[in-house]
Image: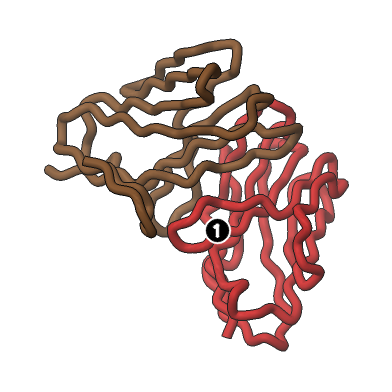
Amino acid sequence: GESVGLHLPTLSVQEGDNSIINCAYSNSASDYFIWYKQESGKGPQFIIDIRSNMDKRQGQRVTVLLNKTVKHLSLQIAATQPGDSAVYFCAENASFQKLVFGTGTRLLVSP
Amino acid sequence: DTEVTQTPKHLVMGMTNKKSLKCEQHMGHRAMYWYKQKAKKPPELMFVYSYEKLSINESVPSRFSPECPNSSLLNLHLHALQPEDSALYLCASSQDGGSGTEAFFGQGTRLTVV
């Protein structure tokens, strides 16, 4: 389930389940969005991106959905694996050269 | 080569010390970035260099001084830091920083100010 509060929002799933991580962005003028995965002690790693002229983009085991009407982005991970455990950030290109990160969601995958 | 290399990986410095963080990329990217990340928080943009010129300074205190000696290198000079400046400092680069260009991140420098 999901929990919010003083700590990072956390999504706990079982191995093999599908995961959905949500993100609300702030700037209606943002035209490019990226999902990053950050493992403990490492820098953010690119997962998938989407431009504002699209509403869906698929990669390997991952899908990003964009709803510009409500300024909402989601990341779907199919058949979640323990190696997917990490913190996931959405980022928006708020203006030229300015990539702004969302608050992040911790994904915990149990074997 | 899709790597952004940051050195050192860890740094402990006193409040009167002067130190520098270094970042290097060989992807031919012309935009380079410094981000600061506190525990359990998202990365926060500090500076952007575009074609070796400072294009964005997010009102960062002057005790942090960026430098871009050439298109492959980015430094962050640190002087008279405070304990609250302890954080993970991330360097990133992108093709030109324009919309639609992904940023590649280094592994970060974990800075502790004592």
Residue A28 is left or right of residue A59, and the answer is right
**Residue at horizontal 53 percent and vertical 31 percent from the top:** A34
Chain identifier of the red chain: B
**Residue at horizontal 57 percent and vertical 86 percent from the top:** B114
Residue A67 is left or right of residue A51, and the answer is left
Q: Residue furthest right?
A: B53
Q: Residue furthest left?
A: A111
Query: Quadrant location of residue A77?
Result: top left
**Residue at horizontal 74 percent and vertical 55 percent from the top:** B74
- Up/down of B24 relative to A72, above or below: below
Residue A76 is left or right of residue B110, and the answer is left
Type of amino acid under label 1: Gln
Rendering coords of residue B57 (x, y %):
79, 53
Mark 1 — on which chain does it sit?
Answer: B
Can residue B96 be seen by looking at this rendering?
A: no
Query: Quadrant location of residue B65?
Result: bottom right
- Up/down of B13 relative to A44, above or below: below
- Up/down of A59 relative to A43, above or below: above
The crowding category of the residue bearing disc 1, from other C-alpha atoms within 10 Å (few below 14, some 14 to 19, many at least 20), is some
Chain identifier of the brown chain: A
Rendering coords of residue B85 (x, y %):
62, 72
Q: Secondary structure at mark 1?
A: strand
Residue matched to label 1: B37
Can residue A42 be seen by looking at this rendering?
A: yes
In-front residue for pair B3/A49 = A49
